[in-house]
């Protein structure tokens, strides 16, 4: 059994989109990768409409189970942050309209999940995306590779692969996993004297 994840690297000019199927053993295969492009000189509303149309096409064509979007973070360029936030909002709204689960992940989370290092550079992320998916070359441009990395991050960090595995596990395996989860969730509080 597999879970299909749509990863989105939001942007007003270039919005990366990538779809992967993730198996219960964490193996992933590429379904689709691309970039939705909007003219840099178009009004913001028109650019958002173009981005929305492109994301809708991917949703229609590939029917993901979940949508993961890169979380907007503070940058020095406020207009860039605003545009990224607007594109992110469009992506999350389109997923919600279809009743799809959504998640956001920071760039550091994505880098750490894919490369093992939260401060990895773009080249390292692209290399690992290609390696994980068995591609001869990393998806281009970088926005496309980033979208795939976001999808992989979500699948691996959120437990999608574990959930898929749980569906095909035996009752004893499920009971054991549930007991381990309860144990990890239990916290011991020690009262210290004042």
Image: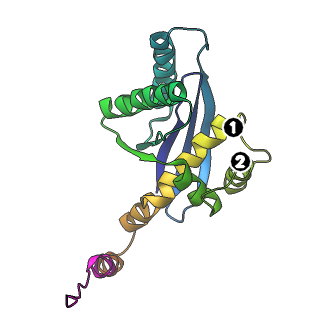
Q: Residues within 10 Å of mark 2 (few under 14, many from 20)?
A: many
Mark 2–mark 1 CB contact (< 8 Å): yes
Residue nearest the observer in this picture, 181 or 161: 181
* Position above or below: 121 against 84: below
Distance from the alpha carbon under mark 2 to that under mark 1:
7 Å
* Position above or below: 100 against 60: below
- On screen, residue 3 versus residue 148, left or right, reads left
Residue matched to label 2: 126
Q: Which segment is the magenta one?
A: 178-194
Task: Inspect this view and state whether residue 187 appears.
Answer: yes
Residue 156 position within the rendered picture, expressed as x and y whole percent measured from the top left: 50, 59
Residue matched to label 1: 142
Q: Residue at x 60, y 9 (%)?
A: 41
Secondary structure state at the residue bearing disc 1 = helix
- On screen, residue 180 versus residue 136, left or right, reads left
* Position above or below: 11 against 164: above
Is residue 127 rendered magenta in the image?
no
């Amino acid at each position: 059994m597999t879970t299909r994840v749509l990863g989105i690297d939001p942007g007003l000019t270039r919005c990366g989109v990538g779809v992967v199927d993730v198996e219960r053993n964490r193996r992933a295969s590429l379904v689709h990768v691309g970039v939705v492009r909007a003219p840099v000189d178009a009004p913001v509303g028109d650019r958002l409409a173009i981005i929305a149309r492109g994301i809708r096409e991917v949703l229609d064509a590939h029917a993901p189970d979940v949508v993961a979007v890169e979380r907007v973070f503070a940058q020095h360029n406020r207009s860039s942050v605003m545009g990224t936030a607007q594109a992110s909002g469009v992506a999350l709204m389109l997923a919600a309209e279809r009743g799809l689960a959504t998640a956001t992940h920071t760039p550091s989370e994505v880098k750490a999940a894919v490369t093992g290092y939260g401060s990895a550079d773009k080249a390292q992320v692209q290399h690992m995306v290609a390696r994980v998916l068995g591609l001869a070359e990393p998806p281009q441009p970088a926005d496309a590779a980033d979208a795939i990395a976001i999808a992989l991050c979500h699948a691996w960090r959120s437990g999608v692969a574990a959930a898929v595995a749980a569906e095909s596990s035996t009752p004893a395996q499920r009971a054991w996993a549930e007991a381990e989860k309860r144990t990890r969730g239990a916290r011991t509080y020690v009262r210290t004297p004042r």
